[in-house]
Image (cartoon, rainbow, N blue to C red):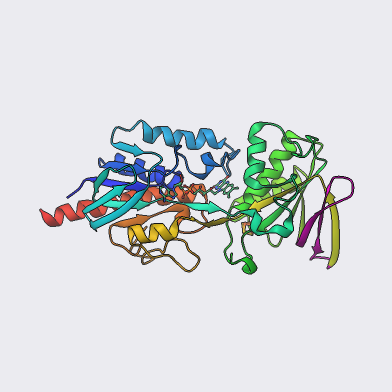
Amino acid sequence: MQDTVLIVGSGPSGLSAAAQVAGAGYKVVMVEKEETLGGAPILSGYAKLVPSGEWAKDAIGRMVKRVEDDKAVTIHKGTRVTQLEGEPGNFTAKLSNNKQIKAGAVVLATGFTHFDSVNKPEWGFGTYPDVLTSTQMEQMVASGKIACPSDGRVPERVAILLCVGSRDRQIGREWCSKICCTVSANLAIEIKEMSPETDVFIYYMDIRTFGLYEDRFYWKSQEEFKTKFVKARIAEVTASGDGRLLVKGEDTLVKRPIVIPFDMVVHAIGMDPNQDNPEISKVFGVELEKHGFLQKGEQYTNTCGTSRPGVYSCGAAYGPETIDDSIAQGAAAGGRAVMDLAALVRKAG
Ligand SMILES: Cc1cc2nc3c(=O)[nH]c(=O)nc-3n(C[C@H](O)[C@H](O)[C@H](O)COP(=O)(O)OP(=O)(O)OC[C@H]3O[C@@H](n4cnc5c(N)ncnc54)[C@H](O)[C@@H]3O)c2cc1C
Ligand code: SF4
């Protein structure tokens, strides 16, 4: 019986799973395809996280350090799993670095892929330099200066368009990405704090700042930081004659067409299934659900399960998820893995 858990992916959920497994006295082998640990918040250079308000590099950096400093954890960066054979308690995994790992359980913490805004060409990304994604805007905030990429001027007006690559059946994205309303309300606050002369408008279908985020982000952004929320259907983003951008669509509250000039437009991009999921499905022998995320095991009695016994999952691998919930699910997946290993040992002995 192996006392090692193989954890694939080192984002918030994988880091949390690793800490849980190591804390329970088991060994961890972590396999991460990139050269840097930390997942999307680190790889994409997020600014301050919701809801904590802490810089991503500090908050997730602490999680990375906790795992890197733990002698029970062996880390393979720039590496993938190419084959998994065996059964609960006794798996053998082959890695792309030609190493072979023995593990009793596997946790797939392989997360998501950011929606690529070029798949929404009518909204100007890739055509106009002042149309950015929310990850690019987060990087701009983290760099400490808000400026139009085209000529470096401070923007007078910024539009944030919600649901880009989410809730859009025309392009096969039927899901809500869950966190982008809250992240965008927070982004508007950050822009205003750094550049008080900039006005921020948020164009939305619905606002889904769920739970306590309604007060902490939606109302705060609106009341304290004067973000203007406009319920609208956006048709296209084009260039105006004076070097600015025109956001065109319909104000769906007053049912009137709108054409509004902006200096910058930000796409609040959604969370796609990890583009590796077809390969992950084959290598690990796990099923995908209809949108392409990992299929959950039976909801109520197979916590963090997948369709293959002994292979667990957590976080955004299952579908759009917040960091807090990804961390909680990572801990649950790590706990489940070691609990099942302990049960196998009891049964054998
Ligand atoms: C613009 C934007 C801003 C956001 N801001 C916030 C916020 O402020 N607060 C919040 O709660 N949430 C936020 N989120 C959501 C947040 O990004 C996710 O909740 C979080 O990243 C999920 O963590 P995870 O570990 O499940 O997945 P990920 O962060 O995606 O990590 C997955 C890891 O697995 C690795 N991996 C993938 N495939 C493989 C493979 N085949 N082999 C090996 N390794 C692999 C990846 O390289 C990555 O390191 C934001 C999302 C977006 C799009
Ligand atoms: S969280 Fe908000 S912006 Fe994101 S997909 Fe859902 S409704 Fe759209």
**Going by the picture, which residue comes out furthest to the left?**
349
Q: Position of residue 224 (x, y in %)?
A: 75, 42
Q: What main secondary structure does the magenta stretch of the protein show?
A: strand
Q: Indicate the position of residue 30 as horizontal and vertical percent values.
A: 35, 42
Image quadrant in which you'd find residue 67: top left
Residue 10, given in percent of the width and then of the height, sits at 42, 43
Q: Is residue 324 visible?
A: yes
Which residue occupies 43% across, 51% down? 110
- Residue pictured at 31% horizontal, 37% vertical: 73
Q: Is residue 217 visible?
A: no
Above/below status of 69 relative to 10 = above
Residue drawn at 67 percent across, 44 percent down: 187
> Horizontal placement of 29 versus 34: left or right?
left
Number of numbered markers:
0
Is residue 208 one of those drawn in magenta? no
Tell me where the magenta segment starts and ends, as one range.
Answer: 232-255
Query: In this image, 20 relative to 86: left or right?
Result: right
Q: Is residue 283 above or below residue 155?
A: below
Taking the magenta stretch, the answer to whether it contains residue 237 is yes
Front in this rendered view, residue 165 or 279: 279
x, y percent for residue 238: 81, 55
Q: In this image, 28 relative to 36: left or right?
A: left
Q: Please state if 6 lies on the left or on the right of 330 as rendered.
A: left
User: Which residue is nearer to you in this view: 111 or 243?
Assistant: 243
